[in-house]
Amino acid sequence: MTGTLVTQSILIIDDNSNNLKILSETLIQAGFNVAVAIDGEMAIKQLEYHRPELILLDVLMPNLNGYEVCQQLKAKQQTRDIPVIFLSALDDAFDKVRAFSVGGVDYVTKPFQADEIIARIKHQLELQAAKAEISQLNKNLEQKVHQRTIELENVIDKLHQEIAQHQQTQQLLKDSECKLENILNSLEEVVWSANVENFNLIYLNAAVEKVYERTVTEFVNQPDLWLEVIHPEDRKQVKQSLSVFPFSSNLELEYRIVRPNGELRWLNTRSRSIYDSNSTAIRIDGISIDITDQKKAQEQLIYNALHDTLTGLPNRTLLMEHLDKALERSKRNPDYLFAVLYIDLDRFKIINDSLGHSVGDQLLVKVGHLLKECCRSVDTVARLGGDEFTILLDEIREIADVTIIAERILKKLTLPINLGTHTAFTAASIGIVISSRHYQNSIELIRNADIAMYQAKESGKGRYALFDREMYAQTLYLSQLETDLRFALARQQFILHYQPIIALATGDIVGFEALIRWQDPERGLVSPREFIKIAEDTGLIVLIGEWVLNEACRQLRAWQLKFSNASQYHISVNLASQQIKQPSLITIVERILKDTELDSNFLKLEITESTLMEEKETIMENFAQIKARNIKLSIDDFGTGYSSLSYLHSFPLDTLKIDRSFVSRMNANQENCEIVRTIINLAHSLGIDAIAEGVETPYQLEQLRKLGCKFAQGYLFAQPLDTQAVELLIASNPKW
């Protein structure tokens, strides 16, 4: 037999063309039809003409961000049921919570593995298919029961009419009864008639023997047997429903019966009252259908929709249901306490990448078993996705009960885990939330447990942290700071200050270091110490760094054209580690130099020492491309990082910048001078120059000159200056 292959359609919404290309190719290879949109407005327009089975949605996009796009989709009848999986480099708990709160079904953190994203897509598509299948089963069952009821009603009505019409002829009556009996006994459904007053059976067909595994005679001789075989938990419901006769002419019930061997079967029974010409109820006719197979299929689909396919543990949906029930119980009973543990494996990515996804899956299954072993039968262990697990500890007496279990989990996860051909070593960070009456929903509990987990990670991993309000306040502050940073970038609230760099041999200015400041309307001038780290954590540093590079090059070129003595000045610009590892870095630098008309010889790019330890091959390639364009390279804050001197010489550097912490301690103590001397000698041995940062006293300046340091900057010469102050300085052409 030849079937038709239905290819499922995926819409990818991402403003990054590289992401679109890679993700599209991956999904097409996996057998999906793929459509793409480069922003939210285009996607919303496309969805008016084409409805995909699933949407992959980037968070950070121009105009409409991913959260706003998702809100618009969920507000429309046409698109509200399409599952949305968020894709983002943002790994903060607030971003995840926000994604789920606007209607997202999953959240995948970039960079991701192709297998992971395909698995998550398939899971959501299977969930949608499961829902559709359940709905279709119910429709089919209802249609079948309705059709059977109509057919039987027609048959019964017709035969009763025949009996009434041929009452004068006994033979014809017998023929009709025989005909009715044959028809009813050929059916698989139980057909019955009962007395309207006491529900004693008037008629019962032979199908009862197959459905109940009891004879017709048993039911006739034992008038209450039909009620006694109903499952005790369902008996009361059936008796209450039947009590409405004859006041209600129609009734439908679903209940369980118990066969003689103890087997349970599900029945669907439809019945109606039959009236005489005086509108008096004279009997009840009914049909009972065995729906056990349909019930089992429905229950299996529901189970699959509420459990993780890999570990068999409850998934996010079922966990949220349990948390909501716990919250309701805590509101009714002030003495009831529960706790939520949010668990993230600390080294799972290393194991998954080095040993493969199959071994990683085995590890997740083993971890799920270990977590259940550490808990009680009343607790709920769930897998949220990836290497994240959550535990609902029910009916705890005090916080010590929770910390004991947390410590037990941490100890278990430090032991070697046997995975057949491999032995894995892992650990975990655990965030803990204790229930309290101020919690309104399960989302708040998961959010706060996630916040506490990140606090445990930041405190050194392999430990637990109890959530407190200060953590939440800090998270809100950082979230607001991130939002404000995005607005600052869009509204051009950043400015640059410039600190002069002095040639110690002549005392002349040779250039400037560009230093970013944030001119916030409410906060005032914000130091980079307050926002650079969150910019790095969220990936915003790439866009901010590109703006700094462009503005610094533009400004230096303007000064070169305006002041004759500035024609040979250079500009130093700091690059974050995310920037130096960008494949598109060289393209961006070339475009900026072209747009600003700045000669590449006057640009110096500075990176921190610790960056040299990250992805050395990628950095070396970018360094080679930078040097090929006559751009200078400098190591910033040298002496504070962990670079290896054994391969420092392999980088094409032009300058080492001596960290201000060493310069500030230069005094009569020769030991501190020796550290600076060593760095200067190292630079000279590598054939490069040294620049001293943080020069504040004449003594430090004198010592640096004696040690052969070529350049310096610091408050002794000038603090970082705004554009107007720099121009006054250049015009005065000072010497130090």
Image: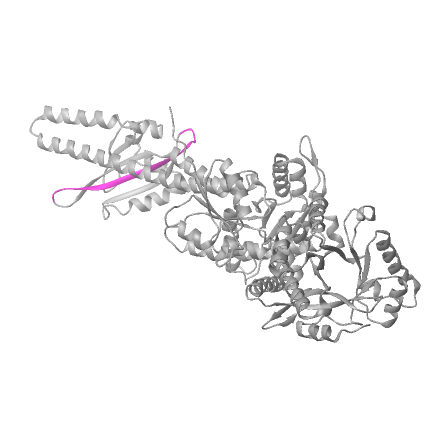
Magenta residues span 260-277
Residue 224: in sight, yes or no?
Answer: yes
Please tell me whether residue 665 belongs to the stretch shown in magenta.
no
Across the whole image, how many numbered discs are drawn on residues? 0
Q: Is residue 298 above or below residue 494?
A: above
- Seen from the viewer's position, the closer of residues 329 and 235 is 329
x, y (%) of residue 731?
A: 72, 74
The residue positioned 62% from the left and 72% from the top of the image is: 523
Residue 433: in sight, yes or no?
Answer: no
Please tell me whether residue 272 belongs to the stretch shown in magenta.
yes
Instruction: Give the quarter of the image for residue 638.
Output: bottom right
The residue positioned 72% from the left and 50% from the top of the image is: 627
Q: Is residue 43 left or right of residue 621?
A: left
Q: Is residue 54 left or right of residue 551?
A: left
Residue farthest to the front? 564
- Seen from the viewer's position, the closer of residues 587 and 558 is 558
For the N terminus, which image quadrant? top left
Q: Is residue 215 left or right of residue 554?
A: left
x, y (%) of residue 594?
A: 61, 57
Q: Is residue 465 left or right of residue 174?
A: right
The colour scheme used to paint the residues is one colour
Q: Main secondary structure of the magenta part?
A: strand
Instruction: Give the quarter of the image for residue 521.
Output: bottom right
Q: Is residue 365 above or below residue 57?
A: above
x, y (%) of residue 93?
A: 59, 55
For the C terminus, which image quadrant? bottom right
x, y (%) of residue 645?
A: 83, 49
